[in-house]
Amino acid sequence: MSRSQATNAIRAGRVRVDGRLVADPAQLVVPERVRITIDGEPQTRAAWRTILFHKPRGIVTTRRDPEGRRTVYDVLGDAAHGLNAVGRLDLATSGLLLLTSDTQLANWVTDPANAVPRVYVVTARGEVTPDEAQRLPAARAEVRKASTRESHLIVGHEVTRLKRVQFGGLEIGDLEPGAWREVTRGEIRRAFPRAPISRGAA
């Protein structure tokens, strides 16, 4: 369930913890130490899983779109079952998007207080010189390719209409648009050394 679906289920009286009806969606529990049922059915903790997805342009990062546009979940199909997107890339932005079953990890990675770096490749109209790149309002900007027609930049802060190629210590590499791959706990630990990682199921 999404967070809003779970909240609605609790308010509808469908959820019990150790046999007791839960009325408060904010009640805290340790999932590994209690028995949770919904409509009388036991709920097991989902397996820990994270994937790295190369989001194509023109795809929205939502589960459903009221305007009928394709979503990352439409593209991924069954591969995204039980996963939530870690942050968002807007409609015109492509590149690295994480999806995970670990809400604790997702919250930590997207919390501005943790300042997880993102790296983007930006295509700009006309020629951008190295001197101009140094004046961009970014943590770091580097000209990758420049011509009179267009320039490719690597920019070290979040902007729009571009391609994200790195998130923390994870890189998109040669993953094609629409393709995805599994990410291991070891990769997550190396990419986000201070991030908490929930245990999930084995």
Image (spheres, rainbow, N blue to C red):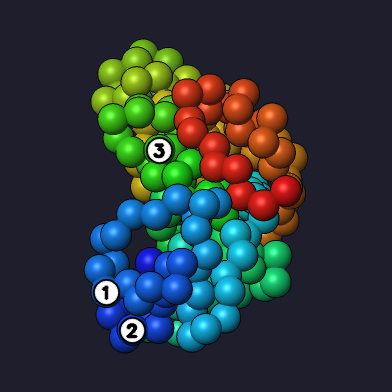
Give the residue pinned by disc 3.
108
Q: What residue type is labelled 2?
A: Gly
Q: x%, y% of residue 192? A: 53, 27
| Label 2 to label 1: alpha-carbon separation | 7 Å
- From the image, tell me which residue sits under label 1: 23
Which structural element holds mark 2?
A: loop
Asked whether, in this view, residue 90 is left or right of residue 99, the answer is: left
Q: Nearer the viewer, residue 46 or 154?
A: 46
Asked if disc 2 and disc 1 are in contact, CB closer than 8 Å, the reply is yes
- Note whether 131 is above or below 49 in the view shown: above
Q: Name the residue under label 2.
A: 13
Residue 72 visible? The answer is: no
Tag 1 secondary structure: loop
Which quadrant of the view contains residue 12? bottom left
In the depicted structure, whether residue 188 falls above or below residue 91: above
- Please indicate whether residue 94 sits to the left or right of residue 87 in the image: right
How far, Cα to Cα, is label 2 from label 3?
30 Å
- Residue displayed at 39% across by 54% down: 29
Disc 1 versus disc 3: nearer the observer: 1
